[in-house]
């Protein structure tokens, strides 16, 4: 059952060194505030899971929080590379990073299967791709009805799932609107779930089929206004596309990166 | 009177013209998104644009920077979860055209967006597959658009992220359930299509003012030309002005965003 | 691409004798008007698919439209038996009826897999149940990662999927709200889809994550006000629970049933 | 002073009391729905009721006739699709208690809701499994409630639709991932629970005024009694009045519905 907690307490209570952690949000509602708190608390050896690592994992990887990354597209959307990710993979800075690489379809299916309590996801995927050659977790099953061979991958059920959403009510039920990504799936498939929200309200005022996470599938609800910035929160603020472009120059250079983190993460209150 | 235009505009307009009105198009970010939206604003008002962020039948007023900008959701008919997008809409066979860019393409339309150099010791780590591996196989057909150069049109790429016709040109024979594959590659120099029988990309149309030598020089393998090669029609004034307005709106919007 | 059609034309165009047809709607939005039109057009040898046959299939089976039924719960909800279904199974009246029987979980998964274009659904199901003994389509696959044996069943992709919804706009896009059941899945997995709606409106005015079926996944849109009665349409009219109770007496008796159909279906304009 | 109440009310109140406050309960229609809603209106205001129609955390003011009455959706926290209900919420392990009725139960808590007589030539065709086969295995535990009679408590049923502990009492040992199974059976005569070691249902509590002979007479196998058998506590005045008001509201509503 959800407890209202400070961001500091939510991260320190649920995120342990060595955990498998997913901070999800497909372009929209990326939980930057929570990621920054993980950096401030100097978590180590995390296995980070995310379809699109985005700037948030670029920052966490650059600060040495991760020993492993499970992902399906590691760029700065519309801009170019994630330079901290590339520096880790190409030059082992700040240390080496193991990767398990999938396609979006596979990871989306793996989250879905995780929410569904299954050990595997089955999809018509990876046909002709060389990704199965470098990812030993891509296997297959044979349909007992048609004989078709289909891709099978392990479902994703992380230790801690972290998402950002628009609203929680005072019971801790959470409403997500707009591009909902895989947020429901990561929370339902996680051992522990932390949700940061723009605001806490008396009534979610939701549509009957809205994406609502009941309080009893969440461990911690944290009020974190603008907690998705520089990504965005539909109904609250827009994506700072300019910052995404600026990040390219910041992240290209190790010193510039460290200075930015120092000024914008380490010396900022959570 | 012919209008003045850049090779890049020629590419976008030509790519846009490929999309039939009413087609359901799964749109990759960047060049495909620009072309698909230009199609929607010109000859194909009923083209249905789908982005992997879950936005269905979206009509953005400005081009999105990312695949999940708010504009895509706000102008969509509806927005579904990402698992639903890949399961029901893409794998479910609802997509007529998958429109992809790539870092590299080879003679059989295979795409590399993963790595230059060895996978475990990359010279350049590229972003990865994203939606492309299954867009390439689950769409009824695939259009590819990218700038023409020896860095992008390569022989024997280090990695095949998303299959065209496989390294031997025959990969699609192995799978029972799969789309036709790349039927068209649009660059800033020409249009290519797979040759019947071999599935090797050959030039079928050359953009005005471009020479065969330029194309040969910009291609990393011994590119061949169709028996009958057309000259691509030039962009119209209207197409150019709509494209330029779209790009101007987009630049103004993104410069001001995030406030 | 959806065409606006009369109910008569939609059924006569798309429903052929011998087809596999699903009229879905989980308690809510059951397409009674469309089912009655199928009875009026005396369709034969249909394979009827529905999780809960409900009164609509009781009527269609009693009128001899079906040679086969794929289902998972064949009662009159909260009331008791479907007497026409029982009469067919127990006494072959009006003729014999083959059945393929599943659980709800399995059928819901099979519709989901059908929408997803897969040949099979995989679920943790039927453990310890004797349903696999009488249904040869319940098989298994083994997870290549954990070794767990999981149930596998064929996905459902019907010839004609028929659902009822609240609204269509003038382009033929359809909005479904409330208990949405498996309606989206049956339509997306069907070769042809017919949607009857309460009304046609200028603008769906829908929530960003509403259940909307785009016009291009539908063949025919039919305006059929009260087309779900005696089931219900959220926002329009309530379930006629009294009629569901009255049906028990009507359906118990072959003559009473035939008289009711005569008065309420055959001699009514579609 | 003890209140006057019927055996049926005794059953419902006892079943309701089984549900702890805050439990997530997947509710079967009929007796389980009545009991679960009584629990919510009495000692367990924070019990979470889920119905297979996709309605989550619903708080109906009247009892639904069907599993998908409008009332369930209108008073729910949210409503999801039926595939999502069975995949994410039930199979995903979110349900603490599956609350089931049945046409028949055997000594190992196996439920038959499929058929009396041979499957291919039924004496009585019952409605079938519905949600029960997977509610029985995916819920962390299962409560069963039904009226006690030789027709319902049977030896060697013609069909096992939903597993309790299997025909040998040991079925759950075969499966790695499965809930505990039926932990409690509530009837109008008594409460039963599986005996440790054998998993055979034995009587653990007898309702006031009911004799052991009555229970033996109403059970289709040689029912056994726990070493220490409790007397079930009587319904309170408050429980009875809330139950009666609920049933009166329900009757009035359904008589008027469908206009």
Image: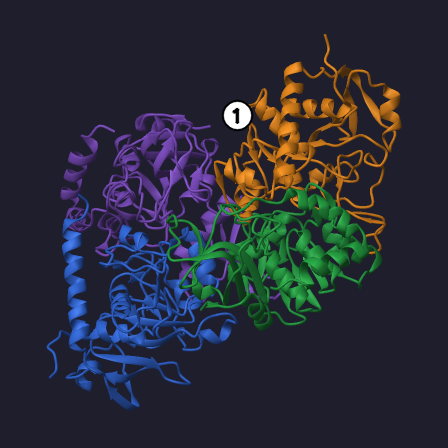
Chain colours: A purple, B blue, C green, D orange
D41 over C94 or under it: above or below: above
Q: How far across and how far down the image is residue D142, in percent?
A: 66, 33
When asked about the image quadrant of residue C45, the answer is bottom right
Q: Is residue C123 visible?
A: yes
Q: Is residue B150 visible?
A: no
The chain under label 1 reads D
| Dot 1 crowding, Cα within 10 Å, few <14, some 14–19, many 20+ | some
The image quadrant where one finds the C terminus of chain C is bottom right
> Which residue is found at the position 62% from the left and 21% from the top?
D242
Q: Which residue is mark 1?
A: D46
Q: Residue furthest top?
A: D1
The image quadrant where one finds the N terminus of chain C is bottom left
Left or right of B55? Residue C165 is right
C259 over B200 or under it: above or below: above
Left or right of B193? Residue D45 is right
> Which residue is found at the position 64% from the left and 69% from the top?
C19
Q: How far across and how far down the image is residue B158, in percent?
A: 32, 66
Q: How far across and how far down the image is residue B130, in percent?
A: 35, 57
D166 over B89 or under it: above or below: above
């Amino acid at each position: 059952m959800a407890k209202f907690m400070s961001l500091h307490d939510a991260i320190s209570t649920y995120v342990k060194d060595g955990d498998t952690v997913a901070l999800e949000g497909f372009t929209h509602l990326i939980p930057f505030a929570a990621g920054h708190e993980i950096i401030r608390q100097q978590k180590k050896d995390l296995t980070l899971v995310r379809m699109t690592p985005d700037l948030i994992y670029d920052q966490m990887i650059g600060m040495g929080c991760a020993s492993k990354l499970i992902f399906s597209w590691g760029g700065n959307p519309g801009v170019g590379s994630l330079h901290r990710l590339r520096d880790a993979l190409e030059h082992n800075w700040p240390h080496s990073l193991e990767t398990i690489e999938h396609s979006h379809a596979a990871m989306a299916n793996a989250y879905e299967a995780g929410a569904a309590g299954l050990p595997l996801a089955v999809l018509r995927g990876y046909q002709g791709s060389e990704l199965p050659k470098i990812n030993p977790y891509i296997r297959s099953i044979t349909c007992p009805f048609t004989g078709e061979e289909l891709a099978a991958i392990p479902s994703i059920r992380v230790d801690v799932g972290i998402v950002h959403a628009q609203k929680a009510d005072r019971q801790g039920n959470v409403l997500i609107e707009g591009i909902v990504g895989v947020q429901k799936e990561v929370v339902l498939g996680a051992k522990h779930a932390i949700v940061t929200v723009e605001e806490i309200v008396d009534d979610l005022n939701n549509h009957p089929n809205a994406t609502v996470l009941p309080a009893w599938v969440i461990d911690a609800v944290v009020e974190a206004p603008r907690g998705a910035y520089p990504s965005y929160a539909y109904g609250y603020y827009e994506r700072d596309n300019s910052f995404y472009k600026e990040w390219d120059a910041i992240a290209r250079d190790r010193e510039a990166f460290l200075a930015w983190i120092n000024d914008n993460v380490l010396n900022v209150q959570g | 009177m012919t209008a003045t235009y850049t090779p890049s505009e020629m590419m976008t307009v030509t790519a846009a013209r490929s999309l039939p009105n009413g087609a359901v198009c799964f749109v990759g970010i960047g060049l495909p998104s620009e072309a698909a939206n230009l199609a929607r604003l010109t000859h194909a008002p009923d083209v249905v644009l789908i982005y992997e962020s879950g936005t269905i039948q979206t009509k953005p007023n400005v081009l999105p920077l990312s695949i999940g900008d708010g504009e895509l959701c706000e102008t969509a008919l509806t927005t579904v979860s990402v698992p639903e997008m890949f399961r029901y809409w893409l794998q479910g066979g609802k997509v007529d055209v998958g429109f992809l860019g790539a870092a590299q393409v080879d003679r059989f339309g295979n795409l590399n967006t993963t790595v230059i150099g060895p996978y475990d010791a990359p010279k350049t780590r590229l972003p990865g597959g994203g939606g492309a591996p299954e867009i390439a196989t689950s769409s009824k057909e695939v259009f590819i658009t990218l700038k023409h150069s020896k860095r992008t049109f390569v022989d024997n790429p280090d990695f095949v992220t998303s299959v065209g016709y496989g390294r031997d040109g025959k990969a699609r024979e192995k799978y029972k359930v799969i789309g036709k594959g790349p039927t068209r590659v649009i660059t800033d120099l020409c249009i290519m299509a797979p040759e019947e029988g071999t599935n090797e990309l050959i030039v079928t149309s050359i953009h005005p003012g471009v020479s065969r030598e330029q194309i040969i020089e910009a291609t990393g393998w011994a590119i061949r030309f169709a028996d009958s090669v057309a000259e691509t029609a030039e962009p119209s004034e209207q197409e150019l002005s709509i494209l330029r307005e779209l790009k101007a709106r987009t630049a103004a919007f993104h410069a001001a965003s995030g406030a």
